[in-house]
Image (cartoon, helix red, strand yellow):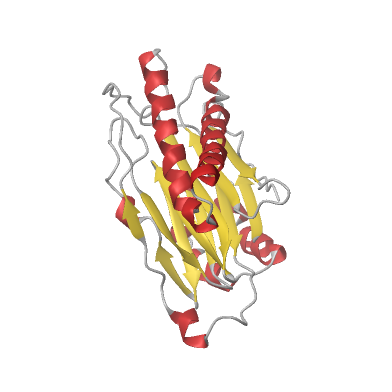
Amino acid sequence: MKIFEFQFNPKAKKDHFFQVFSFEPKKGEEQGTLYIIGELANALPTNASFLGRLAAVVKEQYDSSQEKKKQTMPSPRSFTPQIRLRDALRKANEFLSNEARNGNVDWLGNLHFAVFAFAPDAGAQLFSVTKVGRMDIWMARGGSLVDVVKNLEGTANQSAKVFGNVVSGKMLPQDRVFVLTKDLFELCAKENLLRDLPLLKEQKQFQRLFKNKEKELSRVSGIFFAAFAETSLKSFPAPKLLRIPSFSLKKIPRLAVPRISIPRIPLPRFPILKLKL
């Protein structure tokens, strides 16, 4: 798996936090990688570590789920990324509910969070993904873009924004997944940058694309994350490479938290462009 990460003006807004977390498997383990992309908007300085704490909860339970299932299900297919991610999200929901009960409601309506789990499978990559809030997640295949999380829209509690469903599928060789925070996605759509994404393969190509829109991108803060499947094509017949993957939805029990209305505050924009590679 090849990974690209670009951050645009991540510190331009003092009450806005962006982070990407990458958790690689332990040495000798073949159950893949966990990636988390987070945004916390309109946040108090005391919540600067909130994304990191939530990511740590997801990662710890994701690992713990595998260890438990190894003891009861000896087959590697018994603890797929989907099963492990669902376990991790239950624990994340508990964490968020506890935060609300303890008086930390700063994240309500302001948390935007995507979790990706990848694992190798017979020359391809199994993946499971979920999101909370304003995250756009797309898959590129054969020059086309597919909205991976379209069916997740509206499934979460709109006041609590806690985790709901999981989408699962398979990435074939040369497939790509793109994750964009909402403000960045809207600008890329407006500037017609999305049509070029399926054609890009190397870091320099992304840099040229963003450099050509430097002025426009200087007006927005956000994260662009890309994952490319690089497995050999030899074990796959050609017709399969042209098919769009099917996605399945699995329910995650949602935990209720207090409904609190938090007004959105317009934030200033800063003409600074920073790329984190």
Position of the N terminus, as image quadrant, is bottom right
Compared with 49, 229 (above or below) is below
Q: Residue at x 42, y 17 (%)?
A: 104
Q: Quadrant of residue 42?
A: top left
Residue 71 location in percent, x, y?
54, 43
Horizontally, residue 258 falls left or right of residue 139, namely left
Residue at the location (59% across, 81% down)? 235
Give the x, y percent position of residue 35: 57, 47
Q: Position of residue 3 (x, y in %)?
A: 65, 57
Position of residue 229 in the picture relative to residue 107 (left or right):
right
Note whether residue 107 is visible.
no
Q: Residue furthest bottom?
A: 238
Residue drawn at 50 percent across, 78 percent down: 142
Q: Is residue 8 above or below residue 149?
A: above
Q: In the figure, is residue 217 to the left or right of 160? A: right
Residue 39's place in the image compared with 176, above or below, is above
Residue in the foreground of this view, choosing between 68 and 117: 68
